[in-house]
């Protein structure tokens, strides 16, 4: 039996025919030794046909089809042209060697060409791959490498499904910048308070918020110029008219020292810088929220955008976080405490970055460790869904958050939480209903409704035809239906009457039982009397027979 080899290269399909190979003694080690030598391998394996791809896009489509185990029309035509034709009712006298068993089974299903894939064929194809540029003469040096590189990049890009909107590096940078901005704004606002307190020390006790303090310091400038005319403008900034009046009164009786105009300008500029930084911090937080909703919507819905972003940045990426088990995720951020506990043989930490979540703060001191473990479990599920799901939605995150709330109630009040299987089923059904995917149950329901609708349509059409063609039959059908209804009513009445009779009979059972017992007693007495009479008669007849026998003996 002849053996053909199908080789899928980056530049096109190639078909080879090995010569002089003993099918019984196919030795893979002998093939491995002969692969490296082109002279020996070129004598055994010869090129039959080669079909180049039209473009890089065509090569990508063919590579995707081969990887999924599907035979394209180009491959079908190529095999049909270059392989011997199979006669109907007869076994083929050749077989096709392929590298992937999936595509071999699909080729056999479609074209009935017998395919095989084993170690011997893989070794032969390895030799073909090694010397492929020598078999095809028209290929220039470097063309095959360029084709392989281009196809490799496009194929891997398509498989990874690179999405610009789901780059988690932006979240990592944003959360780092947000943390540094918090520290900087805090330290700068404290510096503004100290600097301006030399001029107006009473303002610190009246206004506690750092952003408002910087805003008022820029507005007031010199406390000596602050009068009652500026109360409405101050009230707009502070949001309270009483506070504005208090600031004006405090400025009149202030104990602070006067500042030169140059010093006041520097204070104002620094206060403006603090205000700009705090406004930029708000914008950055909004940006982080939107990016987290794009990249990890379920994790953000479960634990919050900031804590979720901190987990992703500490793990390195969303994929690294998805690979972490829940036990690692639980103590993520508390590595120093963990290794210190392991070194000193003390108690290991119960939580790391997860501690910033509101759930652990709401749990009692006794249940904080349990809550951290349960929350880490749900966070690992949410991160895996966000990392590996193609469609982004917050359904799973909301359901998981509900489960954590139920677990809190269970620890506090003892209310039994819902099962995880039921919650996940409900989440999947809601996603399918939103996306328009029809489940098997919905299909069955739709089929049943369609069948019933068709039946009703048929009945309606039949009724309309009867109205048009045979009105008398329609009247007869109505009368027959009325008769059937009357019969049913009669049957129901009979059943009701029988049930009433049975109830009455059950009610009179006690009296009837007494009468029956008396009657049974009288009948038994009569039977006893009759039996006694019969016994007496039998005794009389027996005695008479004995007397007769004695008389006959005496006479003798």
Image (tube, rainbow, N blue to C red):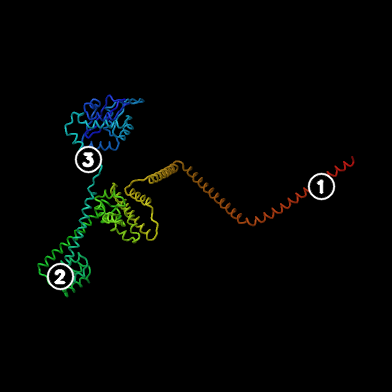
**Residue nearer the viewer, 515 or 15:** 15
> Quick one: label 1, few (<14), some, or many (20+) residues within 10 Å?
few
Q: Nearer the viewer, residue 502 or 1?
A: 1
Question: Local crowd at mark 2 within 10 Å, few (<14), some, or many (≥20)?
Answer: some
Where 370 falls versus 229 (above or below)? above
Question: Helix, strand or loop at disc 2?
Answer: loop
Residue pointed to by mark 3: 154
> Regarding mark 3 in the picture, which secondary structure is present there?
helix
Q: Give the quarter of the figure containing the C terminus.
A: top right
Closer to the N terminus: mark 3 or mark 1?
3
| Residue 216 - label | none
Q: Which residue is label 2 attached to?
A: 198
**Dot 1 lies on which element?**
helix
Q: Residue at x 27, y 51 (%)?
A: 296
- The reply to whether dot 2 and dot 3 touch (C-beta < 8 Å) is no
Q: Position of residue 314 (x, y in %)?
A: 25, 53
Disc 1: which residue: 540
Q: Is residue 510 visible?
A: yes
């Amino acid at each position: 039996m002849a053996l053909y080899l199908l080789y899928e290269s980056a530049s096109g399909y190639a078909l080879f025919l090995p010569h002089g190979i003993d099918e019984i003694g196919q030795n893979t080690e002998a093939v491995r030794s002969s692969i490296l030598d082109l002279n020996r391998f070129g004598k055994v394996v010869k090129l039959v046909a080669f079909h180049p791809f039209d473009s890089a896009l065509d090569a990508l489509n063919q590579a995707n089809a081969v990887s999924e185990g599907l035979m394209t029309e180009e491959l079908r035509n190529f095999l049909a042209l270059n392989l011997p034709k199979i006669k109907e009712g007869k076994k083929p006298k050749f077989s096709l060697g392929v590298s992937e068993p999936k595509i071999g089974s699909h080729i056999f299903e479609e074209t009935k060409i017998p395919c095989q894939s084993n170690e011997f064929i893989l070794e032969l194809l390895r030799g073909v791959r090694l010397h492929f540029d020598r078999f095809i003469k028209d290929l220039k040096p470097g063309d095959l490498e360029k084709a392989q590189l281009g196809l490799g990049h496009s194929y891997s890009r398509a498989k990874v499904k690179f999405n610009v909107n789901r780059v988690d590096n932006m979240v990592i940078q944003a959360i780092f910048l947000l943390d540094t901005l918090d520290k900087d704004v805090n330290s700068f606002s404290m510096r503004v308070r100290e600097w301006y307190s030399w001029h107006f020390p009473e303002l610190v006790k009246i206004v506690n918020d750092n952003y408002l303090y910087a805003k008022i310091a820029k507005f007031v400038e010199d406390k000596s110029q602050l009068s009652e005319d500026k109360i409405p403008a101050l009230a707009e900034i502070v949001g309270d008219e009483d506070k504005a009046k208090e600031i004006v009164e405090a400025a009149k009786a202030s104990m602070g020292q006067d500042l030169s105009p140059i010093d006041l300008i520097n204070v104002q500029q620094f206060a403006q810088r603090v205000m700009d930084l705090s406004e930029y911090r708000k914008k950055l937080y909004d940006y982080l929220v939107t990016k987290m909703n794009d990249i990890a919507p379920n994790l953000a819905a479960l634990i919050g955008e900031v804590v979720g972003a901190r987990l992703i940045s500490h793990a390195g990426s969303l994929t690294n976080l998805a690979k972490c088990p829940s036990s690692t995720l639980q103590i993520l951020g508390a590595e120093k405490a963990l290794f210190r506990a392991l070194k000193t043989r003390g108690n290991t930490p119960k939580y790391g970055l997860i501690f910033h979540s509101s759930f652990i703060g709401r749990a009692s001191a006794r249940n904080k460790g349990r809550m951290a473990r349960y929350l880490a479990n749900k966070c690992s599920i949410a991160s895996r869904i966000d990392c590996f799901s193609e469609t982004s939605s917050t359904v799973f995150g909301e359901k998981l958050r509900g489960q954590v709330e139920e677990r809190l109630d269970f620890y506090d009040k003892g209310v039994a939480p819902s099962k995880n299987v039921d919650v996940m089923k409900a989440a999947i059904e809601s996603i399918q209903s939103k996306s328009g995917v029809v489940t098997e149950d919905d299909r069955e329901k739709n089929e049943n409704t369609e069948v019933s609708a068709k039946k009703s349509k048929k009945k309606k059409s039949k009724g309309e035809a009867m109205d048009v063609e045979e009105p008398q039959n329609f009247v007869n059908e109505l009368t027959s239906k009325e008769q059937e209804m009357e019969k049913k009513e009669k049957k129901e009445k009979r059943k009701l009457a029988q049930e009433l009779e049975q109830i009455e009979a059950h009610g009179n059972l006690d009296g009837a039982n007494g009468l029956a017992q008396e009657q049974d007693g009288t009948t038994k007495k009569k039977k006893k009397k009759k039996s006694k009479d019969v016994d007496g008669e039998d005794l009389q007849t027996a005695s008479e027979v004995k007397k007769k026998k004695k008389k006959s003996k005496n006479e003798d």
